[in-house]
Image (cartoon, rainbow, N blue to C red):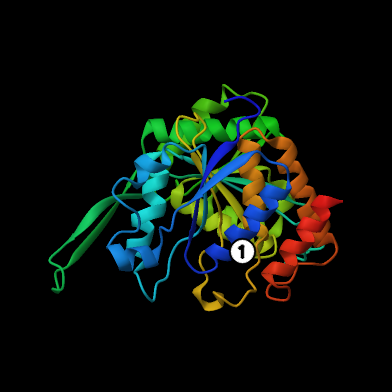
Amino acid sequence: MTSDTPHRIALIPGDGIGTPVTEAALQIVAASGAAVETVTFPWSCDHYLTTGAMMPEDGIATLRGFDAIFLGAVGWPARVPDSVSLHGLLLPIRKAFVQYANIRPHRLLPGVEGPLKTREFDILCIRENTEGEYSGAGGRVHVGTPDEVAVETSVFTRTGVERILRFGFEQAQARRGHLASVTKSNAQRHSMVFWDEVTEELAAQYPDVQVTRYHIDAMCARMVMAPETLDVVVASNLFGDILTDLGAAIQGGLGFAASANIDPTRQGPSMFEPVHGSAPDIAEQGIANPMAAIWSAAMMLDHLGQTEAGARIMAALEATTAQGIGTLQGRDSTDAITKAVLAHLED
């Protein structure tokens, strides 16, 4: 791909507030000067109710031809069980394209007040994204009887654990040189002890990175009590899921929580999405905060090598919150926030 060739982006607005925040992010990307072409796919819970599938059988093959995927949100529990919507769209995409690194930045934007006493934190949470506790291995027998049994098996492979930890070490090298590895190895003596052992093996290869091991409960406490002491945090699929929602809380709420599902090998497209979900309770009210989606779009451009456009978006986003626009959930409309970011892009 030459520098003049636009990157092809697959847009999946999804459900609920996914549509307006995706539209907002797309406006910002277009105004940033980024070279992109987009194609929109209507895959969602409505699509499931109409067709019986969250996406077509050839959905993965279709997405493979794109440089990146931008997802708004998936889910509408009152219409389609989360177990159906999640396993029918989001998880298959993550696994098919080996998007094993889920990246979520946690810091306060200017003007945003978090619940903690301190503002001085900048945490990059890296969550293993394709196996572990969400591998889907298990089953149920004797369903509906007093003898019913449900088994959910976590799967940790050396390949999976080593590659996510190595990615974490590399991110720590590029930042402040500190890596926190999160397990529960005092209770989970097989999978989590294995994770700790791989961490120690890799640490010898990255002598410039200071490594600290935490149990998940201690890490939750540290993110609240001393978040400024953390740099890069690496955790399994389940623990990373929990920690990143906590990270969203301390950075002011889910409206500011951006994320990237990355294939570091770049053999397939990576996917970018806000963390907040589809929020059916405020859908069509025009008050969804698009900042997480806009931040995710900036991460997407950075990943694609369009760093100047990504930096312009982040600067405009920070200038907007510094004015107090979009800093309180539900106070400013989606359109008002989008227009404010656009205005700063044009400055």
Picture layout, residue 317 above or below residue 95: below
Q: Is residue 197 above or below residue 134?
A: above
Q: Nearer the viewer, residue 67 or 92?
A: 67
Question: Residue at (65%, 34%) from the top-left corner?
Answer: 172
Find residue 246 and report its horizontal and vertical position in percent. 59, 60
* Left or right relative to 333: residue 241: left
Rendered location of residue 125, percent (x, y): 60, 47
In the structure shown, which secondary structural element does the residue marked by tag 1 occupy?
Answer: helix
| Residue 190 appearing in the image | no
Residue 177: percent from the left, percent from the top? Answer: 69, 33
**Is residue 6 at all visible to an observer of this figure?**
yes
Binning the other alpha carbons within 10 Å of mark 1 as few (below 14), some (14 to 19) or many (20 upward) gives: many
Q: Position of residue 161 (x, y in %)?
A: 44, 35
Report the side of 157 relative to 5 (left or right). left
> Label 1 is placed on what type of residue?
Leu
Is 11 or 267 nearer to us in this picture? 11
Residue at image position (45%, 34%) is 268
Q: Is residue 283 left or right of residue 120?
A: left
Residue located 28% across and 49% down the image: 57
For the image, the number of numbered tags is: 1
Residue labelled with disc 1: 254
Closer to the camera in the image, 73 or 216: 73
The one of 66 and 319 positioned closer to us in this rendering: 66
| Rendered-image quadrant of the N terminus | top right
> Image check: 334 left or right of 75?
right
Q: Residue at x 52, y 64 (%)?
A: 277
Residue 291 lies in quadrant? bottom right
* Quadrant assignment, res 318: bottom right
195 up-or-down from 50: above or below: above
